[in-house]
Image (spheres, helix red, strand yellow):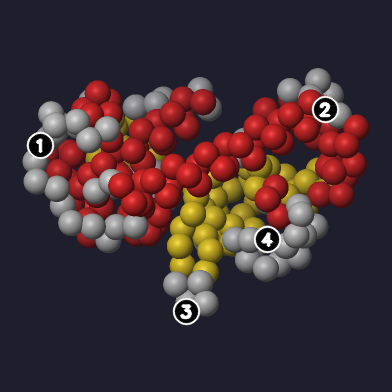
Amino acid sequence: MSLWLKTGDSSLLERVVKKKQVFKRGEVLYRMGQLVEHMYVIRGGSVKTSVSTEDGQVQVIGFHVEGELLGLNAIESREYHCEARAMGVTSVCEVSIDRFEELAKKDPSIQYEVLKIMSAEIRHSHELLTLLGKHNAEERLAIFLLRLSRQFAKRHCSSTEFNLSMSRSDIGNHLGIAEETVCRVFARFQDDGIISSAYRHIKLNDITRLQQIANHRPSYNRPALSR
């Protein structure tokens, strides 16, 4: 809830929250094209966002965790540009978009936090384009795991041991590689002692080697898997 706490107004959250609710795994928070009335702050659990193309293909564009704000990029058009679906039991606060805008106009600290959130989203989009265009399967998985590590560290959780809330299929969809390839890369990393994996539980045993893989360094010179 850092967005709200940094404003210095302890009652801000209560002033903009419409209601609190819980979504079960697979339930939809909002759909692409749906009119916007509120945004969501994730209180616990995790959410994946995806877009659908005209030919019915689905692309996972992001995974979101506790403390993140969803729906901010829909303020201008007043409609959601993606679908948001709970990846497990997820609790959220519905934030009144009209009340939020009203308070943001008066409070520069809220404006600054929104600017930081939008800047991070733009950076993530650029990084994803680079990831899909310049990296092979091992490098994509290494970068993905390192990002999760940093994400958990920011939440003051273990940066080396955590559960993956997303499926191998969703990971592959997000990274532009086949689900089977995701499984093979995880198995390869485990065989080489880089990670330990038991279903969705992951332990990063060698951060340095993951960084070497992510940065195209030659110390990890096994043949690359196809995409």
Q: Where residue 80 appears, x then y in whole percent?
A: 68, 60
Q: Report if residue 88 is visible in the image.
A: no
Q: Determine the image quadrant of residue 69.
A: top right
Separation of residues labelled 2 and 3 (CA atoms): 43 Å
Amino acid carrying label 4: it is: Tyr
In front of the other: 83 or 136: 136
Which residue is tagged 2? 108
Query: Which one is closest to the eye, mark 2 or mark 4?
Result: 2
**Judging from the image, what secondary structure is the residue with disc 3 in?**
loop
Asked if residue 225 is positioned above or below residue 81 in the image, the reply reads above
Residue 92: image x %, image y %? 67, 46
Does the rendering let one see residue 6? yes
Up-down: is 118 above or below 113?
A: below
What residue would you read off at disc 3?
55
Whether pointer 1 and pointer 3 mark residues with C-beta atoms closer than 8 Å, the reply is no
Identify the residue under disc 4.
80
- Marks 2 and 4 sit apart, C-alpha to C-alpha, by 25 Å
Q: How much space separates mark 1 and mark 3, taking CA atoms?
A: 39 Å
Write the residue at 58% across / 48% down: 90
